[in-house]
Image (cartoon, rainbow, N blue to C red):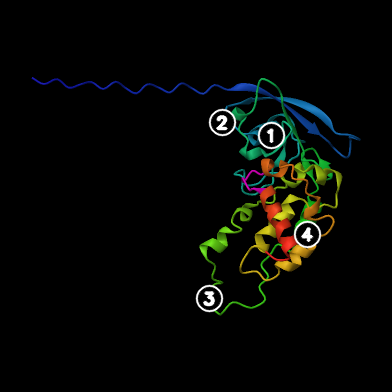
Amino acid sequence: MSTATLEQPPAEAAPIESFTVTFLIRRFDPDVDTEPRWQDFDVEMYPTDRVLDALHKIKWEQDGSLTFRRSCAHGICGSDAMRINGRNRLACKTLIKDLDISKPIYVEAIKGLPLEKDLIVDMEPFFASYREVQPFLQPKTAAAPGKERVQSVAERARFDDTTKCILCAACTSSCPVFWTDGQYFGPAAIVNAHRFIFDSRDDEAKVRLDILNDKEGVWRCRTTFNCTEACPRGIEVTKAIAEVKQAVMRGKP
């Protein structure tokens, strides 16, 4: 007589425990405050929650006046860039478990751009620099009807890294030169110029190089690598700026 082996039921996974995290948020209401002020909030969180989740909980459950930008919540739109514990990050990509929760988590607006309210800054100076470098394809001849502009894998690889920019301003607002010189184009504008300067399909690289050869262009970069460290997309920003400098000296890509 055969006997069947009784399988043991799978052990239940241990429940994930929540914990209380203190957030210190730098608040500013232009209708009330003359200077920004810090306000603390205690929030019940899980390790896999994100800072953006905490901001949502604060706004929805504790203080509906808290103001910040967010959209896709998946690190694509770039709208929720802010300083978290002194570093520029995307709130939607910063996990609670990756922060030291034994101390308060500090959240404030990015630096170098005019503060409008709470965690929101005026992005227009940033986008003005972006527009000035002409970040769009400018071929001198039209493509043949029904044909693509052919580009080799190697030609595409030349500028692939800088196509990843999501215009979050994390790199530009981490730059100490940008903090002190509002006229500096900033890393993001140079990165987006790089994307077209080295594109084999574009014919106006010289125009962009002349723009970036200005006194507020690439030569204001001090190679501190803050921008590279801050980029949530992993773009080698400082390397891209160095390549643009070399192209300026050559007078061509």
Highlighted range, magenta = 231-237
Label pair 3/4, CB-CB below 8 angstroms: no
Mark nearer the N terminus (3 vs 4): 3
Left or right for 197, reference 147 = right
Residue at image x 53%, y 76%?
Answer: 147
Residue annotated with mark 4: 212
Furthest toward the right, the residue is 34
Disc 2 marks a residue whose amino acid type is Thr
How many angstroms separate mark 3 from mark 4 (CA)? Answer: 33 Å
Q: Nearer the viewer, mark 2 or mark 1?
A: 2
**Image mark for residue 147:** 3
- Magenta span: predominant SS is loop
- Vertical order, 212 against 227 (above or below): below
- Viewer-nearest of discs 2 and 3: 3
Q: Is residue 234 magenta?
A: yes
Relative image position of residue 250 (x, y in whole percent): 72, 63
| Amino acid at pointer 3 | Lys
Q: Is residue 177 found left or right of 10 in the rendered image?
A: right
